[in-house]
Amino acid sequence: MLRLRRDLDMVFRQAKPVRGSFGKLSVRILFRERTSQTAAAIQYLFVAPKRNIRHANERNKIKRWLREAVRTSELEKQIQETLRANDLEALVMIRVYEPPSATMNWTVISEEIPLVFEAIAKVAPKQQ
């Protein structure tokens, strides 16, 4: 998870949008040289804006779903290994604008996260 203010600012200023066929999620990514050998190669920022999702419990539910979908993704682990081999790290921001409903639920997120990682794999630097 991204926690440092400078990292957050860097993601919002410099991260490039990731284009893909995922409709409910907005994804931005920034690749940079690895700053710490102990930190994960991919650091995440999950955003559920208060403007769009009014209730805190709904924002928290969306973020829990995102964390779990990322945690169980096999492609994410492969991308982590590739980035470590290239001594890079990725700062990834995943934003959701819709509250939990029939059209935004665990099933939708669990189907879209693999698509997000496929799109990230396309733009990720290849192993040298």
Image (cartoon, helix red, strand yellow):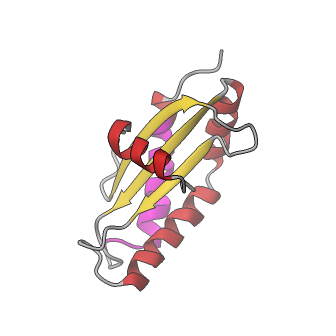
Say whether residue 19 is visible. no
The N terminus appears in which quarter of the rendering?
A: bottom right
| Residue 116 image offset from top left, x and y in percent | 45, 46
Residue at 30% from the left image edge and 54% from the top image edge? 23
Q: Which of 125 and 13 is in front in this view?
A: 13
Say whether residue 123 is visible. yes
**Where is residue 104, by image quadrant?**
bottom left
Residue sitting at the far left? 51
**Where is residue 94, by image quadrant?**
bottom left
Q: Nearer the viewer, residue 106 or 55?
A: 55
Asked whether, in this view, residue 101 is left or right of residue 72, the answer is left
| Residue 75 image offset from top left, x and y in percent | 61, 43
Asked whether, in this view, residue 14 is left or right of residue 72, the answer is left
Residue sitting at the far top? 128
Query: Magenta residues?
Result: 103-120
Q: How many marks?
A: 0
Residue at 38% from the left image edge and 48% from the top image edge? 27
Residue at 53% from the left image edge and 30% from the top image edge? 32
The C terminus appears in which quarter of the rendering?
A: top right
Residue at 65% from the left image edge and 48% from the top image edge? 74
| Residue 120 image offset from top left, x and y in percent | 48, 37
- Examine the structure image and report whether residue 53 is included in the region drawn in magenta: no
Asked whether, in this view, residue 43 is left or right of residue 17, the answer is right
Q: Which of 39 and 80 is in front in this view?
A: 39
Asked whether, in this view, residue 64 is left or right of residue 24, the answer is right
| Residue 60 image offset from top left, x and y in percent | 46, 77
| Magenta part, dominant SS | helix
Q: In this view, does 16 lie above or below 107?
A: above
- Examine the structure image and report whether residue 116 is included in the region drawn in magenta: yes
